[in-house]
Image (tube, rainbow, N blue to C red):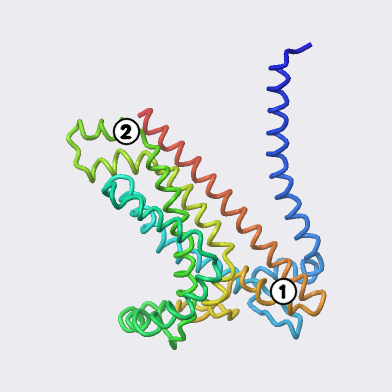
Amino acid sequence: MGSPSRFGDRAFEWLTMAMAGAVALLVILVGWQLSRDSMLAIHQFGWNFLVSTTWDPVAEQFGAAPFIYGTLVSSLIALIIAVPLSIATAVYLTELAPLSIRQPIISLIEMLAAIPSVILGLWGIFVMIPFLRDYPFPFLKKYFGWSGLFTGPIYGVSMLAGGIIIAVMILPIITSVSREILRSVPNLQREAAYALGATRWEVTRIAVLSYARKGLFGAVILGLGRALGETMAVTMVIGNTPQIVLSLLKPGYTLASVIANEFTEATTELYLQALFEIALVLFGITILANLLAQLLLKTMGTTQTTRAVQ
C-alpha cells in the first residue's frame, strides 16, 4: 500500500489534470454549441457566408465579410497604436522611471484597465469623437488623403475611431504584462552589458528587450485577444455600417458589434442562426490567431537556439 504522501501527490496530480481538462472541454463545448445553433445558416449559405458582403435581414441574405473586415482592421489599428506605447511605457517603468513616480503611474494604468467598456464608450462618444472630428481627422484628410485611407466625409464615428478606442482598452493589459516580463529579466543580463561598456539604451535594447521578446510577443497576443472580442465600446463609436471600404474615416462594423446590436432584433430562425454563425466565425478567428501566435513563438525560439549554437 502506498504511503500517504504518495497518495496526496497522485490526488493533486489528478485534480490539476481534471481542472486543465475542464478548460479544454469548455472550449470544445462552446464550439459545439455555436456550430449546432448555426447549422441552418451553414447549410443555407455554406462557405459563401464568409465572402459575401450582403447583410439584408429583410431578404434573409447574410454574409459576414464586412464584419470580418471590420474586426481585423480595427484590431490592427489598435495594435499599431497600443503596442509601441505599451512596450515603451513598460520599459520606462522598469528601466528608467524614478521610484517616486513609478508606483503612481502603475496605479493609473491599473485603474484604466478596471474602467468598464461601456464607460469608455460614453467617453468615446462625447469626448473623443468630437475631438477627432474637429482636429485630427481633417488634418489626416488634408495631408494624407492621397493614400486613400483618409478620404470621404468626416462623420466622427468611423473605423479609425473604433481602432483608437480598442487601443485605449488593450494598452493597460499589454503594459502590465510587458512590465512583469521585463522585471523578470535577470539583473545579470544588465550587469554583463554594462561591464562591456554598453550605454543605458544599448543595455535596454540588447540585454533586456532582446531577452524578453518572446514574452513581449505573448503580451501582444493577449491584447489581440481582447481587441478581437471587444464589443460595447466599439459598437458605440465605429458607426455600425456593414461595408468594406478603404477609408478609415468611414463607418464600419465588427463581428462582436453586430451580435450585440442585432441579437434581440432577430425575428426569424435563419436570422438568429446567422448571428450564431457570426459568433462561430469570431470564435474561430480567435482560436486561429492564438494558434498562429504559438507557431510564431516556436519559430522565434528555434531561431534563438540556432543563433546561440552558432
- Kindly give the residue lying farthest to the left in the view shown: 197
Q: Which residue is mark 1?
A: 263
Name which residue lies at 63% across and 77% down: 53
Residue 130 horizontal/vertical position (percent): 42, 83
Residue 136 x/y as whole percent: 35, 79
Q: Is residue 254 above or below residue 225?
A: below
Q: Amino acid at mark 1?
A: Phe
Label whose residue precedes the other's in the sequence (1 or 2): 2
Q: Residues within 10 Å of mark 2 (few under 14, many from 20)?
A: few
Q: Is residue 307 left or right of residue 2?
A: left
Percent of width and height locating residue 2: 75, 13
Q: Residue at x 57, y 74 (%)?
A: 235
- Relative image position of residue 198 (x, y in whole percent): 20, 38
Q: Depth check: give the residue in front, 239 or 291.
A: 239
Q: CA distance from mark 1 to mark 2?
A: 53 Å
Give the residue drawn at x 47%, y 49%. Answer: 219
